[in-house]
Image (cartoon, grey):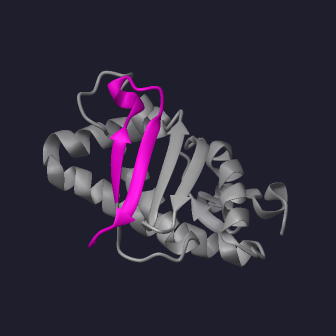
Amino acid sequence: MKLLDEAFRITFDDKNADVKVSDVPVILMSKKTFGMIHKELVSVLGRKGESLLYHAGYEAGRQGVATMKKWWDFRNKEEIIEAYKKQFPRFGWLCLDSIEEDMDKKEVKIITHNNFESRQYQKNSDDPVCYFIRGYLCGFVEVAFELEALRCDEVSCEAKGNDHCEFLMKPMFW
């Protein structure tokens, strides 16, 4: 398995306004800017805005794991998890505290803190707000754990004043 620094190299092409991380085109955006976009989507579109963020995150999570598998020679899901524990904070997304799995129930619980999505609300939200991250983690778990048709509930959220965000993935259909 490659080291994180081997896989993540950033390049700039100022002439073409192009930034790449390991040959993947990216944009650099402040957390404050993303937070404003997030709040406006939810404010203007309501549940549709929440759904848009969730589904975008879900697809990004599935594709992210597939891309990481190409970069590294993962032997098992534990190696994928360890890589993501390093990737998430490096990209400024979140700190991944724990992943607990109950394969009998086909459930996975993920606990995070310093989530970029919840921090914009400064503990002033009545509801969980991590729609994109919730979707991303669901897509991530489906691919990394080779599970299908999961749903993800955010049962604790820093935006509400909780100490951490907690996500529970379980089968969509019991």
Residue drawn at (66%, 68%) of the image: 77
The magenta span reads 152-174
Picture layout, residue 156 above or below residue 62: above
- Where on the picture, by quarter, is residue 149? bottom left
Residue drawn at (44%, 68%) of the image: 106
Image location (x, y in percent) of residue 60: 47, 65
User: On the picture, is 53 further left or further right than 33?
Assistant: left
Image location (x, y in percent) of residue 9: 77, 58
Nearer to us in this view, 50 or 17:
50
Total numbered badges shown on the rendered structure: 0
- Where on the picture, by quarter, is residue 22? bottom right
Q: Is residue 153 magenta?
A: yes
Image location (x, y in percent) of residue 92: 60, 41
Quadrant, the N terminus? bottom right
Residue drawn at (74%, 58%) of the image: 11
Residue drawn at (63%, 67%) of the image: 24
Picture layout, residue 70 above or below residue 160: below
Image location (x, y in percent) of residue 115: 49, 38
Q: Which residue lies furthest to the front in this view?
A: 104
Q: Is residue 157 magenta?
A: yes
- Where on the picture, by quarter, is residue 129? top left
Picture layout, residue 32 above or below residue 22: above
User: On the picture, is 156 further left or further right than 172?
Assistant: right
Quadrant, the C terminus? bottom left
Nearer to us in this view, 63 or 11:
63
User: On the picture, is 171 further left or further right than 24?
Assistant: left
User: On the picture, is 63 further left or further right than 80?
Assistant: left
